[in-house]
Image (cartoon, rainbow, N blue to C red):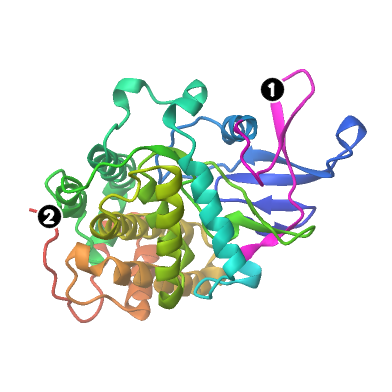
């Protein structure tokens, strides 16, 4: 979630945080975090709540363990978070490495706590009108695909159409008649609960005091199908294959005990949610890297192009089956596409295809 910057500043995906030393009546809790929105940050995920602070306050009243406290400063509406002293789990357990048994147990307990929080418990701070909310797992996944189609691709795609074409990403995969929406019609129904929505190694803090995991960054919290939270977690955590099965087994046992029916259709429906997450990552990464490449100074551009090549190629590889890609462009080919894109800022549609034409099976109609 955070990256150290000068003067005790942390850069999150959605906000920049100033870490402050508490004084006066707030001194006992220790350090505090005050967040400001990052200008120019684009939204790639739906949200159910206007403010992360609203969610944290409600969760504290519901007895949720190991989350940051929220304090109100002064007579206005400024709210700050208690700072969790420690380091992200990604420092000691980088992506691709296994977690300890204790850490897996704590994550299962976190999912179990979320499973006990029904939609009605957060009705007071829910930002979506009731008539626009999904109430079945099928509608929930349809809504996710629709959000990516309308609020991600439709917003950014027209200016980047040439880039998507060069990478052989067919937006028809997001269409109402595309493979993701068709698979949504096959989902089993599961009861809804609170979802974290972004549970990965950088959003889990290993506390200095006792080594326990604290959960931060509730910006993308949702009310919805618990299987989506699991799919997002598995997609972002990158467990070793040998440990992923143990995580699944532990999740299913805990969730079925806390929220009966939450594991219905698990083996069939988890791949459907994972397919969506992988496709969503492609659209998100292609767009984010395009903006980064355009904003990078010339002397730093080669390094940024290399990062874009590695990241986008990996995302394409993960979603290749759903996208209908016969051959996935490698990092060097993707880097060349972005280099051409950066050289033609006013005409992205002129970006050439990568060398070695890849056979493509259309993902949509």
- In this rendered view, identify the residue nearer to me: 105 or 360: 105
Check disc 1 and report the residue beneath it.
Answer: 77
Image side of residue 168 versus residue 81, left or right:
left
Image side of residue 114 versus residue 38, left or right:
left
CA neighbours of label 1 inside 10 A, class few (<14), some (14 to 19), many (20+): few
Residue 204, image quadrant = bottom right
Please determine whether, in this image, residue 101 is positioned above or below residue 134. Answer: below
| Residue 118 badge | none
Image quadrant occupied by the N terminus: bottom right
Q: Residue at x 65, y 46 (%)?
A: 16
Extreme residue toward the right, this view? 24
Check disc 2 and report the residue beneath it.
Answer: 364
Q: Percent position (x, y) of residue 347?
A: 29, 56
Q: Percent position (x, y) of residue 196?
A: 49, 45
Residue 144, image quadrant = top left
Q: Percent position (x, y) of residue 119?
A: 43, 30
Q: Residue at x 46, y 44 (%)?
A: 258
The stretch of residues the image draws in magenta is: 62-89
Extreme residue toward the top, this view? 75
Q: Secondary structure at mark 1?
A: loop
For marks 2 and 1, the one nearer the N-term is: 1
Q: Residue at x 35, y 21 (%)?
A: 130
- In this rendered view, identify the residue nearer to me: 281 or 36: 281
Magenta-span inclusion, residue 103: no
Query: Do we see residue 80 in this rendering?
Result: yes
Q: Secondary structure at mark 2?
A: loop
Image side of residue 241 versus residue 102, left or right:
left
């Amino acid at each position: 979630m955070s990256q150290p910057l000068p003067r005790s500043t942390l850069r999150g995906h959605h906000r920049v945080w100033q870490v402050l030393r508490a004084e006066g009546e707030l001194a006992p809790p220790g350090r505090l975090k005050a967040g400001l929105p990052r200008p120019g940050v684009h939204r790639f995920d739906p949200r159910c709540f206007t403010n992360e602070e609203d969610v944290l306050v409600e969760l504290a009243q519901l007895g949720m363990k190991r989350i940051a406290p929220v304090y109100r400063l002064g007579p206005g509406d400024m709210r700050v978070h208690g700072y969790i002293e420690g380091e992200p789990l990604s420092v000691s357990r980088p992506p691709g490495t296994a977690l300890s048994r204790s850490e897996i147990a704590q994550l299962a307990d976190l999912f179990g706590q979320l499973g006990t929080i029904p939609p009605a418990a957060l009705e007071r701070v829910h930002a979506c009108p009731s008539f626009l909310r999904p109430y079945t797992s099928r509608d929930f996944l349809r809504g996710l695909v629709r959000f990516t189609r309308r609020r991600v691709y439709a917003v950014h795609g027209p200016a980047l159409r040439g880039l998507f074409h060069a990478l052989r990403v067919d937006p028809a995969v997001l269409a109402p008649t595309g493979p993701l929406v068709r698979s949504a019609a096959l989902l089993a129904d599961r009861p809804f609960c609170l979802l974290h929505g972004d549970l990965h190694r950088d959003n889990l803090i290993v506390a200095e005091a006792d080594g326990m995991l604290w959960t931060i960054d509730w910006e993308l919290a949702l009310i919805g199908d618990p299987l989506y939270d699991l799919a997002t977690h598995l997609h972002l955590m990158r467990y070793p294959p040998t440990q992923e099965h143990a995580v699944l087994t532990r999740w299913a046992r805990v969730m079925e005990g806390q929220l009966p029916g939450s594991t219905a259709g698990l083996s069939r429906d988890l791949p459907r949610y994972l397919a969506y997450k992988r496709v969503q990552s492609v659209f998100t990464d292609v767009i984010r890297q395009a903006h980064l490449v355009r904003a990078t100074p010339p002397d730093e551009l080669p390094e940024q192009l290399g990062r874009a090549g590695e990241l986008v190629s990996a995302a394409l590889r993960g979603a290749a089956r759903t996208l209908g890609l016969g051959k996935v462009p490698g990092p060097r080919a993707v880097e060349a596409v972005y280099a051409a894109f950066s050289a033609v800022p006013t005409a992205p549609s002129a970006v050439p295809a990568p060398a070695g034409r890849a056979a493509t099976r259309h993902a949509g109609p």
